[in-house]
């Protein structure tokens, strides 16, 4: 995947590039900035600039906090907006996370067009039903193993997970 930001600012890191938080990425990329990008294979996508967290691998799913732009790799019983890391954005790093379009995510054994659920494995999503852990506004777009082992294609539109008690 080679995502190209449609309206990049001078000095803006590329999708997939990981930078140090200490580098002061406030200008031209403030945390929470959302951009549109295009990939020849996956089409148009939407990305948000967020802080990393320990052990995040490329294509891990995270829940992020819009108050301080921190991230937590997905695990059961978390709630909040969901994004997919476009690089190994670990603690003290920052970078782009996908929140819209078709992309790739760390996944267990899944089927094409399956609903998406958080699992007990940090950063991984699955289609096995887990009450209270469904990722809404998301569906798998391939079986696991596409484009490679441990991954699956996914279609997302600003996904979120909640505990299922909201009306």
Image (cartoon, rainbow, N blue to C red):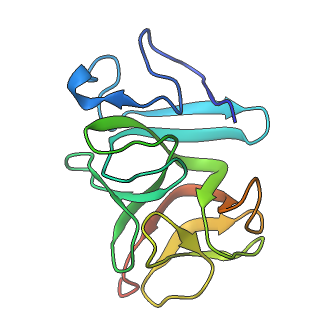
Asked if residue 162 shows in the view, the reply is yes
Q: Position of residue 45 (x, y in %)?
A: 62, 40
Q: Is residue 7 above or below residue 95?
A: above
Q: Position of residue 62 (x, y in %)?
A: 41, 58
Is residue 24 at least partly visible in the picture? Answer: no
**Image-based side of 41 in relation to 16, left or right:** right
Residue 146: name its quadrant.
bottom right
Q: Where residue 88 sits in the image (x, y, percent)? A: 45, 43
Could you tell me which residue is drawn at 46 percent across and 63 percent down?
Answer: 123
Q: Quadrant of the C terminus?
A: bottom left
Identify the residue shown where x is 37% and y is 53%: 55
Residue 114 x/y as whole percent: 70, 76
Which residue is farthest top?
A: 10
Give the residue displayed 35% in from the left and 24% down from the top.
29
Rendered position, 135 above or below 58: below
Q: Is residue 106 above or below residue 94?
A: below
In front here: 76 or 65? 76
Choose top left, top right, bottom left or bottom right for residue 137: bottom right
Q: Quadrant of the N terminus?
A: top right
């Amino acid at each position: 995947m080679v995502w190209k930001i449609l309206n990049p600012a001078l000095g803006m890191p590329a999708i997939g590039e990981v930078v140090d938080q200490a580098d002061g990425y406030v200008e031209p990329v403030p945390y929470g900035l959302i951009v549109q990008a295009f990939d020849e294979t996956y089409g148009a996508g939407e990305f948000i600039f967020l802080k990393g967290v320990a052990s995040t691998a490329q294509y891990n799913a995270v829940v992020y906090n819009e108050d301080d732009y921190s991230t937590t790799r997905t695990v059961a019983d978390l709630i909040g907006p969901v994004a997919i890391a476009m690089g190994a954005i670990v603690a003290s790093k920052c970078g782009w996370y996908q929140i819209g379009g078709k992309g790739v995510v760390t996944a267990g054994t899944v089927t094409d067009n399956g609903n998406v659920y958080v699992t007990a494995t940090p950063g991984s999503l699955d289609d096995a039903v887990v009450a209270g852990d469904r990722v809404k506004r998301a569906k798998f777009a391939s079986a696991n193993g596409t484009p490679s082992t441990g991954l699956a294609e996914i279609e997302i539109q600003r996904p979120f997970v909640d505990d299922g008690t909201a009306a």
